[in-house]
Amino acid sequence: MPNADITLIGNAIDKPAEYGKIKVLRLATNNGKDDKKPAYWDIKILAPWLCDAASSIEKGERLIIIGHMQGTEYQTKDGQTRHGMEVIANTIGRVLQAPTTTTTPAWNYAPDVPQF
């Protein structure tokens, strides 16, 4: 099954869980403020440098994940073969948001500085 590239922007549900040499990050995304039901993603972090960076992720942080989707196959307890998808992270970044308060430019407080 071919891989498909994916970019996700969402909030970390918790700190990444560690499973041996890999980490798994749970991410919640939605399609805008009118979307009441978020989608939940399990993001596998395999690269050692990303695992180190992921250690500093905190619950609620706004993140961008760039990676690829990969098909999986597994057996249920009763022997049936099931197929699924997983997201493998290639890049993890923090989303920098604009301040939520109104600011006044500094030149309004300096009478000797010419205003433009």
Image: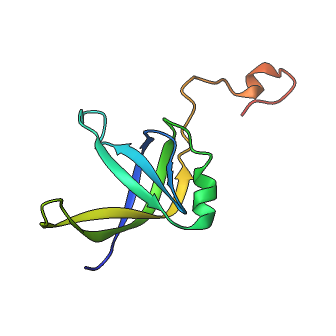
> Which residue shows up at 44% across the image and 41% down it?
11
Q: Quadrant of the C terminus?
A: top right
Residue 67 horizontal/vertical position (percent): 43, 65
Residue 113 horizontal/vertical position (percent): 84, 29
Question: In this image, 4 relative to 45: left or right?
Answer: left
Quarter occupied by residue 49: bottom right
> Which residue shows up at 76% across the image and 27% down it?
107
Residue 114 horizontal/vertical position (percent): 81, 30
Q: Examine the rendered structure and indicate whether residue 36 appears above or below residue 10.
A: above
Q: Examine the rendered structure and indicate whether residue 82 appears above or below residue 94.
A: below
Residue 65 horizontal/vertical position (percent): 46, 56
In the foreground, 14 or 109: 14
Quarter occupied by residue 8: bottom left
Question: In this image, 27 relative to 115: left or right?
Answer: left
- Residue furthest toward the front? 78
> Which residue shows up at 31% across the image and 45% down it?
40
In the foreground, 97 or 6: 6
Q: Examine the rendered structure and indicate whether residue 4 appears above or below residue 41.
A: below
> Which residue shows up at 18% across the image and 61% down it?
76
Question: In this image, 40 relative to 50: left or right?
Answer: left
